[in-house]
Image: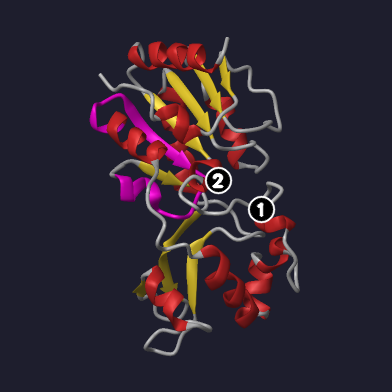
Amino acid sequence: MDLQQKIAALQQMIDTSKRIVFFGGAGVSTESGIPDFRSVDGLYNQKYKFPPETILSHSFFQSETEEFYRFYQEKMLELDAKPNAAHLKLAELEQAGKLSAVITQNIDGLHQAAGSKRVYELHGSVHRNYCQRCGKFYDARYVKACGGVPKCECGGILKPDVVLYEESLDDRCITDSIRAIAKADMMIIGGTSLAVYPAAGLIQYFNGENLVVINKGHTQRSTGAKLTIDAPIGQVLSQIVVR
C-alpha cells in the first residue's frame, strides 16, 4: 500500500474503534521544534562536556547540580513550542469520545496544551518543579529564568518532576497506563523507536483488535502491528477526519 492507502486504512480503523489509546514518543514533539535524543541530529549525538545520559542522571543532579541545570535550562526547556497537528488531532479524538488516553514519554506538556485531558506522563513534566526542602511548586518559566541553580524562597534547591536516569517510573502512572492499554480496542504507537524501557514494554498489555505504528524511521522491535506507516505523525494524523 502507498501512504494514502495506509492513511485510508487508518481512518477505517479509527472509525470502527471506541477505546483508542495513543502511546507516543519524541517524534510527536519534533514537529513542534523540540529536538529528540536518538536521531542523527539528536541531543545524544551532540558534543558536551559530559554525555547527556550522564548529565540527566539522579547522581549527577545531586553531585553536579550547577552543570545539570546549565544543560537542562539550555536544552530541555523549549517553552515556546506549540502543539502540532498530531497533538491537536489526538485532543479532538478525545473530545469526540474516541480516544481514552494518551500515554507519552515526552516531558513537554504539549498534549495538555492542545487540550488533551487524560494524559499519562511516563517520564514526568518540565512544567512541575518542587523544592526539595519544603515541597513548594514552581513552574518551568521560573526555572528557565533563573539562569543558574533555581532555588525556593526557603533556600532549598528545586528539582524538576522528570524521571532522571537511575530513577524509577511512577508506580501509579504505570498502573493507570497498563489499565488503559488493556481496555483499549485500538492502540496507536507514534513517534517512537520503542528503544526506551520500561516504557516500551507497556505495549505487551494490548489485547485489542488494531495495533498501528506511525513512525518516521525504523522501530527497535517488532510489534506485530496490523498497520505500519513510515511518515511523520503530524502529517498522517492531520488527514484523519474525526466523526
Residue nearest the viewer, comparing 196 with 218: 218
Q: Is residue 115 visible?
A: yes
Q: Position of residue 179 (x, y in %)?
A: 43, 31
Q: Residue at x 45, y 82 (%)?
A: 146
Q: Tell me if label 2 and label 1 are in contact, CB under 8 Å.
A: yes
- Please identify the quarter of the rendering in which residue 66 is found: bottom right
Q: CA distance from mark 2 to mark 1?
A: 10 Å
The quarter of the rendered structure image containing the N terminus is top right
Dot 2 or dot 1, earlier in sequence: 2
Identify the residue under disc 2: 26
**Callout 2: few (<14), some (14-19), or many (20+) C-alpha neighbours within 10 Å?**
many
The residue under label 2 is which amino acid type? Answer: Ala
Q: Specify the segment rendered in magenta.
A: 94-114
Q: Residue at x 45, y 39 (%)?
A: 103
Residue nearest the viewer, comparing 80 with 119: 80
Secondary structure beneath dot 2 equals loop
